[in-house]
Image: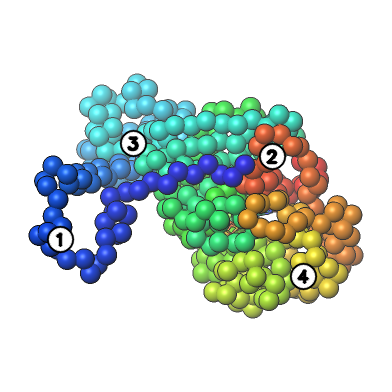
Amino acid sequence: MPPVRKKVVKPAAVAAQTPKSAPAKPPAQEQQPAQAQPPPPKPQQPLKPLAWGLLPAEWKAACAEFRQPAFRAKQIWKWLQQRRAISWDAMTDIPTALRDKLAERYDITAWTDDAYEQSADDGVRKLLLCCRDGVRIESVIIPARDQSTLCISSQAGCAFGCAFCATGKCGFERNLDPGEIVGQFVAAAAVATRRLTHVVFMGMGEPFANYDNVIKAVRILNDFDGIAIGARRMTLSTCGVVPGIERLATENLQVELSVSLHAPTDELRSKIMPVNKRWPMTELMAACDNYTRTTGRVITFEYTLVDGFNNLPEHADRLIELIKPMKGRVNLIPLSPVEHFDGVAPDMESCEAFARRLQKAAINVTLRRSKGKGVTAACGQLRLSRLAAAASAQIPVSDI
Ligand code: SAH
Ligand code: SF4
């Protein structure tokens, strides 16, 4: 199932469609009677910031501004991040006057609508969330043994246009703000049957194209007095946005990094990933090498296997040459079929042969076996998130 999308035409977009060269006033003979003119687009109310997107220090500053003692900031934080309050009124130990001020300034409800689909056979749940401006996004809960991974979106749509990706096909709508990123966790936690222990940024969008908001959300999710997901249990996945990799190396954050490689040469990679023209493989691998040396952390390279395209022995050998010097891990994923891309996944035997070749070269490799044909399993995004779960949890995908 393709991701549920809804094109929202905003006044700004309507204005942008007006040609710049259009005369300020139409010629007299073309003027319509006043009553036939369409009403001017209503100016959109700017949305209030979402309460879920504030860090503890920002609550402190807000309380100082409201002339409240500092402990109020802690109370608000606990109500939100620990008790997951969904209304200001629920915060009974906070004075009503302050609650009113908070409600005036911040929204506590991130979604105007939510729904989820349950996969019949493997417990996977896909959440469909509608943002306050009508933009729709997806998150996926993937239960595995005694833990559970949430795959979240960092953007509505994606501008990077990878040939094999359902999200890329739909184009870019907008960045998600930190409150919408954390809000996905809150919504998922409310319907998850097991505790959410891991978070992977492998839903819609490119996290490093929305860097500041994603890192802020990571810090909120990580806060020990709040949701408290360990940094090592969070994975950022990038298609190869080199400045993002460079910045992450300086953050002093223990998050996992996945790099979607999918091909071992510039020639092949550029055919399926336009980002490779902007940051070719020499630059990408240099940034990865620097990241590994600076942080001491291992990068997982995602490699989607497409039959006859990137799964030959010489491709495996080239991949080994690239990954080995920086002791990277490889996560192999047989391609999930998407309508607009006419590649197919190799058969499992061929995938295993590819994996064995890497293993023989002492590369740490995981391979996902296809499993489950439930309702949600038809969704490309869901399949991606399954592999994400394996990457973040550091368990063989075949065991999910
Ligand atoms: N934009 C980021 C994160 C979201 S995509 C990135 O590209 O890394 C999450 C993962 O799903 C990426 O590794 C992506 O390449 C992979 N993916 C996308 N479409 C796929 C498909 N049809 N089959 C298998 N993996 C796919
Ligand atoms: Fe965007 Fe990632 Fe899909 Fe590429 S694979 S189009 S970067 S979401």
When the figure is inspected, residue 388 is found, relative to residue 285, above or below; the finding is above
- For marks 4 and 2, give the CA distance: 29 Å
* Quadrant of the rendered image containing residue 272: bottom right
Q: Earlier in the sequence, mark 3 or mark 1?
A: 1
- Read off the residue under disc 1: 26
Q: Are marks 2 and 3 in contact (CB under 8 Å)?
A: no
Residue in view at x 71 percent, y 51 percent: 336
When the figure is inspected, residue 206 is found, relative to residue 107, above or below; the finding is below
Query: Helix or strand or loop: what does disc 2 sit on?
Result: helix
Query: Helix or strand or loop: what does disc 1 sit on?
Result: loop
Q: Which mark is residue 377?
A: 2
- For marks 3 and 1, give the CA distance: 42 Å
Residue in view at x 20 percent, y 45 percent: 38
- For marks 4 and 3, give the CA distance: 47 Å
Q: Earlier in the sequence, mark 4 or mark 1?
A: 1
In-front residue for pair 145/276: 276
Residue in view at x 52 percent, y 65 percent: 244
Q: Image quadrant for the N terminus?
A: top right
Residue in view at x 17 percent, y 44 percent: 36
Q: Which mark is residue 107?
A: 3
Q: Residue furthest bottom?
A: 282
Query: Helix or strand or loop: what does disc 3 sit on?
Result: loop
Query: Helix or strand or loop: what does disc 4 sit on?
Result: helix
Give the x, y percent position of residue 380.
64, 47
Q: Which mark is residue 319?
A: 4
Give the x, y percent position of residue 334.
76, 54
Ligand 1 quadrant in view: bottom right
Number of residues whose C-alpha sits closer than 10 Å to that of mark 4, classed few (under 14), some (14–19) or many (20 or more): many
